[in-house]
Amino acid sequence: MNEKDLARYLDETVDPAATVAAMPESALAELADALYRHLDTPSPAFGAYAWYIQVADELQMRRPAATAREAADSDDHSSGGLAGHSGGLAGTEVPAG
């Protein structure tokens, strides 16, 4: 999506909630990417952040299972991959040879 396409969404006459709700998931993902890149510029357009939040929330609502799975994966990684294990290898005997 180029800047001209993105500018059509950022037009103040467009309702973000209604527009986002009507978009297919692939178009939402493309818009989220374009908004993310736009927000990383020195002077993002007024309202771009609000659009980004609206799009991200809509994608999260449409993908509840994927979001829950990602949260579980990040929990596993934050605990060193030993989720559900208490202790560790400290204090265990290792056979010789």
Image (cartoon, rainbow, N blue to C red):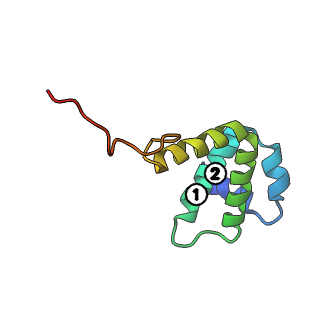
Expressed as whole percent of the image width and height from the top left, the position of residue 63 reads: 71, 39
Q: Is residue 68 visible?
A: yes
What residue lies at 64% left-to-right and 44% top-to-bottom? 29
Expressed as whole percent of the image width and height from the top left, the position of residue 95 reads: 22, 29
Secondary structure of residue under mark 1: helix
Outermost residue, top direction?
A: 97
**Total labels drawn:** 2
Q: Amino acid at mark 1?
A: Tyr
* The label number, if any, that marks residue 77 in the structure image: none
Residue 49 appears in which quarter of the rendering? bottom right
Along the line of sight, which residue is nearer the eye, 61 or 24? 61
Residue, disc 2: 32
How many angstroms separate mark 1 from mark 2 (CA)?
Answer: 6 Å
What residue lies at 84% left-to-right and 59% top-to-bottom? 15
Mark 2: give few (<14), some (14-19) or many (20+) Cα within 10 Å: some
Expressed as whole percent of the image width and height from the top left, the position of residue 35 reads: 62, 57
Secondary structure of residue under mark 2: helix
What residue lies at 76% left-to-right and 63% top-to-bottom? 11
Expressed as whole percent of the image width and height from the top left, the position of residue 91 reads: 32, 44
Q: Is residue 63 visible?
A: no
Along the line of sight, which residue is nearer the eye, 39 or 1? 39
Q: Is the Cβ of the residue at disc 1 closer than 8 Å to that at disc 2?
A: yes
Image quarter (top left, top right, bottom left or bottom right) of the C terminus: top left
Q: Is residue 37 left or right of residue 14?
A: left
What residue lies at 79% left-to-right and 66% top-to-bottom? 12
Q: Amino acid at mark 2?
A: Ala
Mark 1: give few (<14), some (14-19) or many (20+) Cα within 10 Å: some
Residue, disc 1: 36
Give the answer, above or below, for where 65 lies relative to 42: above
